[in-house]
Each structure stands twice: as C-alpha cells, then as structure tokens.
Amino acid sequence: MSTPLPVLICGAGPTGMTLALELARFGVPFRIIDKALHGAEQSQALGVQARTLELLEPARITDRLLALAQRVTHVQIAAGTHSLVEADFGDLPTAYPYLAMIPQCDTERVMREALETQGIAIERAITLTAMRQDSGGIDVDLAGPGGTERVRVRYLAGCDGAHSAVRHHLDVPFEGYALPERFALADVHLDTSLAPDTLRVRLAADGGAVALFPLRDFWRILIESPNALPDPPDPSIFQAALDAEALPARIRDVVWMANYHIHQRRVAHMQSANAFLLGDAAHVHSPIGGQGMNSGIGDAINLAWKLALVIRDDVAPALLDTYAEERGAVGRALLAATDYGNRLAFNANTMVRALRNAVLPVASHLPLVRDRLRENIAQLRIAYPHSRLSVNASPARRGLRAGMRVRGARPASYHPQTIVMHPHDQSAAITLVLRPDGYAGYVSDGAHAHGALTYVRNIIGLRS
Ligand SMILES: Cc1cc2nc3c(=O)[nH]c(=O)nc-3n(C[C@H](O)[C@H](O)[C@H](O)COP(=O)(O)OP(=O)(O)OC[C@H]3O[C@@H](n4cnc5c(N)ncnc54)[C@H](O)[C@@H]3O)c2cc1C
C-alpha cells in the first residue's frame, strides 16, 4: 500500500492558504485543492488585524500586505451627532498599531503568489465529494475535469468555508441561528473630504446602521437594516444612508454591490479524529469588529506547527487535540462577543438604546475598557491560559503568563524555543518556552532551563 499523503487541505481561501504557507515553511508535504476556478474576485473581508499581521510575518507576506493597505488608526462610532466611541489604535502594543484595510481578493493574491514562488500550485476545479475515515487515516474522493481520484491521506484540513463539505461528511452540526438583520455593501468611489484614516460607524434610531470603511482605491459602505433591503441592491440606498447620517460624501461610481445576511454558528468540535475544521467551516458570525477572516488565519497558524511536529518528529498525535481545545475556546468567545456587539449596535428598543448611548461614551473613556476594546478588536488579547499546553511554574504574578502572546516573537521553525528574558518591569529573569505560534507555553521565574526542557519533553512530547 502506498504511503498516505501527510495533509490534504480542502479549500484555498485565506484559511487554507495560510495553512499551506505554514506547512510549506515547516517542510510538511501536502496538497491544496479548491473546487473554484479562481479565488475571491471581490473585496469581501477588508480588515486585517494587528495580530494577523504579526502571525503572517514568518511567511514573509506582512510587508506585501501592508503595501496594499489603507492604515486606519481611528474608529468613530456615533448615534446621530452623539459620539459613543472614539478609539485610537495609534498606541496599540504592537508593531502594527492600526487596522490594515485590504480587499480580500488582494490578501488572497498575496498569499497565492507567496505559494507560487515556492513552486506550490493550488489544484483548482477539484471538489472533495466523499470521505471515509478509519483508524489509520482518511480515503478522500476528489472529482475534477479528468474524473474522480481516490486519495489516501493521513490528515484532512477542512478549510472549505461556511458550507463546508468536510463538515457535512463528518456529520458535525453547525449550531447557531440566522441573524434577523439584513446587510448591503457597496464598494464605491467617493467625492469626499473625509480623512481616510478613520472608520466611521453611525447607529440609527430604528436599529439600522451605516459604516464607511476607507481603502486605498475606494471606500466600502455597509448598511445594516432591521427591514428588507432592495434586492439586488440599489445604488441610491447607499447615498441616502450617507445623507441621512450627514456624512459629507458623494458617490461617484459603484465598483461592486452585494446583499447578504449572516448566521452566528459554530461547530461544537473542530476535530473529528484525523479531520480538522478551520475558518468559516468551523465558525461564522456577524462582521462586527472585522474578525471573520482573521479568525480563520489564526486557526491555521495554531494547527500548522502541531501537524508539523506530529508528522515530522513523530510527536504523539494527542498534541493535535489541543488545536480544537484552544481554537474552540476562541471560537466560543468570538461568537459571544459578536452576539453582544450586535445586540448593542443594532437595537431598536428605545430603552436599550438610551442606556447604550448614556453608558458607552463614559465606559469607552475608561483606560481599562478602552484598551480592552482596542486590543480585542486587534486580536492581541487572544490567549490560551486554560490550555493543557500552558504551564506556569511560578505562582501567579503580574506580567507574562503561560498561554499569553509574547510580543514581537515568533520562532522561524515549528520547534518550541526556550528563552531566558529580562523584562524591564521585572527585577529577575523569566524562563519561557515560546511556542512556534508566538504564545508562551511554559513560564517560570528565574533561569530555569531544566523546567523548560521537562515541559518540552513531557507536555509537547518532543523526545530530544
Ligand atoms: C460579501 C461578503 C462580505 C464579507 N465581509 C467581511 C468583512 O467585512 N469582514 C470579515 O472578517 N469577513 C467578511 N466576510 C467573510 C470572509 O470573506 C470569510 O470569513 C473568509 O473568506 C473565510 O475564509 P475561509 O478561507 O475560511 O473560507 P472561504 O473564503 O469561504 O474559502 C473556502 C474555499 O473552499 C472551497 N471549497 C468549498 N467546498 C469545497 C469542496 N467540496 N472541495 C474543494 N473546495 C471547496 C471554496 O471554493 C472556497 O474557495 C465577507 C464575506 C462575504 C461573502
């Protein structure tokens, strides 16, 4: 019997391509297939968050993305003329203190080109049509122009979007509900004096909203409405929405328009034996906070180094269980936060709106609330404190704890790295095992190389 393919990536959206970039970097053989003839041709997801830019650094695409980005440093949310939130991203604790606004088609192009320069081609017009899992791996049927091919794979990564075939074949429920709100978006050229460093959101009295996103070559107008919107969208509703909120901008021409509605859904388990669900295949939610695409990229970064250790270094496959544990917790928190954000933003109840309008301006000026809000949006606060991979060898103290992001650090390889740090806010040294995704695995006060080695052997499972 031939050796199984180590990894098959089903779906070449941002999630699948991130996984491909990481596996290529780690020297893991894989194939990446997509049923579509080409990638996204429209802007779709715009906001690339600071944490995502950090996570993509080792794949050497962050600079290329930034070359295409409009940097947004301010977010302004108002109800009519009443300012609710003024967030300044300028002093975020990251090398990327802004929201990088990039059309998804450009983000995908940068990823695709980075794969191509390494000789990796996405296999297009290939559809996963069936799969059967046994104790040793998975038989996958791939249908393409030349017929159907059966491939034996060790691991399958379902990065195949909200209507995931992998999820359907695994019979994993996608639990949640459809949001009642209706959304319409238009990418437009505007005549305006509005500064392009600010993302503006206006919440209307009927529970509707309009948001104006700056990009390098155009603007995105997003309308949310509690009522039905014209289908297909009518350009006049976008100008009317700008005028109703007294946003001084005239639409010159429309590049793209779309109507959509949204589900808040997630899978209870992101792993089923040797098959994994990532990105929109595992969680979909409101666009509030611009988290969708970024969360899929985060899933891929989390899984890639674990797959590499198991496949290349023969670490026990139990390490892979931590993918679903860690990213499942992130997905749960993401759905809770976007659900809360929706209720706060799109609420037609007069009492709730009055309370929101009174409390938000005060709360968002409190340094703790302000910092948490910005850092949550930028995904800088994503952490794995309850993971079995997070070990604190010293009693609780302020500062770095296991599971937290280590600023400015991502090892080049898929092996965890032991580091002795001398942070300026601590009098003594800290020993740290840095995971390949830039999170602290083990943290101990003092120089404690033996503890770090024991952690790498016993918790990660590396023999040498
Ligand atoms: C109109 C619109 C606006 C959006 N706006 C935002 C936004 O402002 N902010 C935000 O964060 N997100 C937004 N999103 C969502 C964002 O586009 C997704 O979160 C993101 O694309 C998810 O990436 P992914 O790689 O997980 O899945 P996808 O991008 O959906 O990629 C899945 C891939 O799998 C392929 N595939 C599916 N089934 C199979 C199969 N059986 N075999 C082989 N291949 C298969 C598909 O062809 C596709 O290429 C928007 C989406 C849309 C449609």
Image: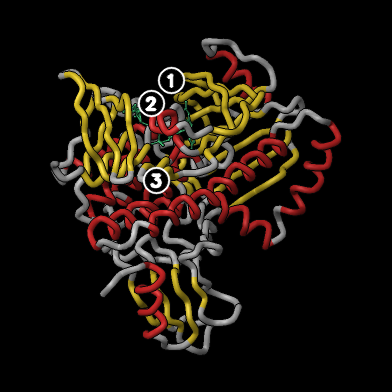
**Residue 268, position as x, y percentages in the image:** 54, 42
Determine which residue is flagged by label 2: 42
Q: What residue type is labelled 3?
A: Ala
Which residue: 70% across, 32% down? 346
Which residue: 41% across, 20% down? 255
**Residue 63, position as x, y percentages in the image:** 30, 51
**Residue 15, position as x, y percentages in the image:** 37, 41
Identify the mark nearer the N-term, 1 or 2: 2
Residue toward you, 77 or 413: 413
The vertical placement of 418 against 20, above or below, is below
Which callout, 1 or 3, points to the residue nearer the camera? 3
Asked if the residue under mark 2 is in contact with the one under mark 3, i.e. CB atoms within 8 Å, the reply is no
Numbered badge on residue 273: 3
Numbered badge on residue 137: none
- Residue 110 seen in the current view: no
Which residue: 47% across, 64% down? 405
